[in-house]
Image: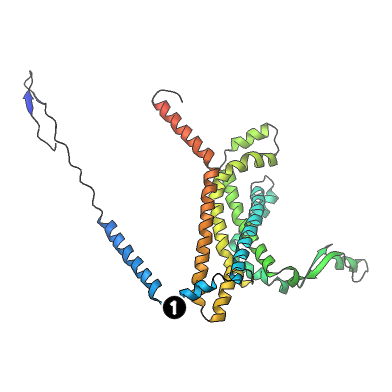
Amino acid sequence: MGGRERRDQDFGGQSVVTGQPEPLKAVPVRHPGRWVAVAVIVVLAAMFAHLLLTNDAFHWSFMFRNMFTPAVLRGVQGTLLMTVLAMFFGIALGIGVAIARLSPNPVLRGVAWVYTWVFRAVPRLVLLALLGNLNILWPQISFGVPFDTYIGKIFGITDLHLRVFEGQTRNLLTGFVAGLIGLALSEAAYMAEIVRAGMQSIDPGQEEAATALGMRRSQTLRRIVLPQAMRVIIPPTGNETIAMLKDTSLLIYVPVTAELFFQLSAVGSRTFLPFPMYVAASLWYLAMVSVLLVGQHFLERYFARGHRTEQARIRLAGIAGEQGGTL
């Protein structure tokens, strides 16, 4: 048994063990694969550092001199503003679509399903390109009575125009507005699924209890379902916000001039040094996403504080039950 033992004879003539076994020596498990992985990582890191320090194609001085110009800083402001507005309208519309998906009304459910199907299927780049060229489809945008000219022809009135407002599409649907509409509509489809999953994670008994107390469905959603669903909604929403910040670079195809990637690409095209500006864009996005990650961490901790307390209470209650006590 790993040690020497002393045996004595008892009164029945049987041998019994009276000595203690020697202690076992624990040998740590070898992990040669870890050391191989560390060696490979160190070599790759050294090669990458050598590339950064010795390759003149980066043009570090040129890059740092141009990535903080007033035009680029205005692009950073435009990127952040677009991210905030697109997420705000996307979340608001997504909540409405999610409620419609869970509505007992089959018409609302069908319309909400079609909306999520379309805007999740169409890539954002394609959607932005369509909205950016919407003036080809409608040179003018007007608001008023639908089919006013056709109604006038029925009653013998020529050139009947029952319109409150009318204007050129290219003047109304600017690059910034078209980009905002495209990103918000696309984001709403994804947020609808996130909000729907969060709402379905809540025990249906709570909604039934609220209904029994006389609360309207809107009150139940606002006061009971959505506050509890935030614990499930916040993490994927943070990921969507980070993705939205990066997807603002697609606005270069609308185009939107007050955007970070557009401004940096313009500097690269003007100076015939595009690669350093692509590196500068990567550094800018890395910095902004890092800030968003910190904010996401604190939001998740804030909305999960009650859940962690409840989990701790349940674990303590289970331990007390196993020991025959009460919590």
Residue 102 lies, with reference to residue 35, above or below; the image says above
Q: Nearer the viewer, residue 319 or 59?
A: 59
Quadrant housing the N terminus:
top left
Q: Nearer the viewer, residue 220 or 108?
A: 220
The three-letter amino acid code for the residue at tag 1 is Ala
Q: Is mark 1 on a helix, strand or loop?
A: helix
Residue 255: quadrant of the picture: bottom right
Residue 125 seen in the current view: no
Residue 295 seen in the current view: yes
Left or right of 308 in this view: 150:
right
Q: Residue 142: horizontal and vertical position, in percent?
A: 80, 66
Residue 2 lies, with reference to residue 45, above or below; the image says above
Residue 204 lies, with reference to residue 127, above or below; the image says above
Left or right of 6 in this view: 293:
right
Residue 24 lies, with reference to residue 164, above or below; the image says above
Question: At 30% across and 60% down in the image, what residue appears?
Answer: 38
Question: At 65% across and 47% down in the image, what residue appears?
Answer: 99
Q: Nearer the viewer, residue 28 or 154?
A: 28
Question: At 59% across and 35% down in the image, what residue appears?
Answer: 205
Left or right of 105 in this view: 302:
left
Q: Residue 74: horizontal and vertical position, in percent?
A: 62, 67
The residue identified by callout 1 is: 57
Q: Residue 265: horizontal and vertical position, in percent?
A: 56, 74
Question: At 48% across and 32% down in the image, what residue appears?
Answer: 313
Disc 1 crowd, CA 10 A, few/some/many (<14, 14-19, 20+): few
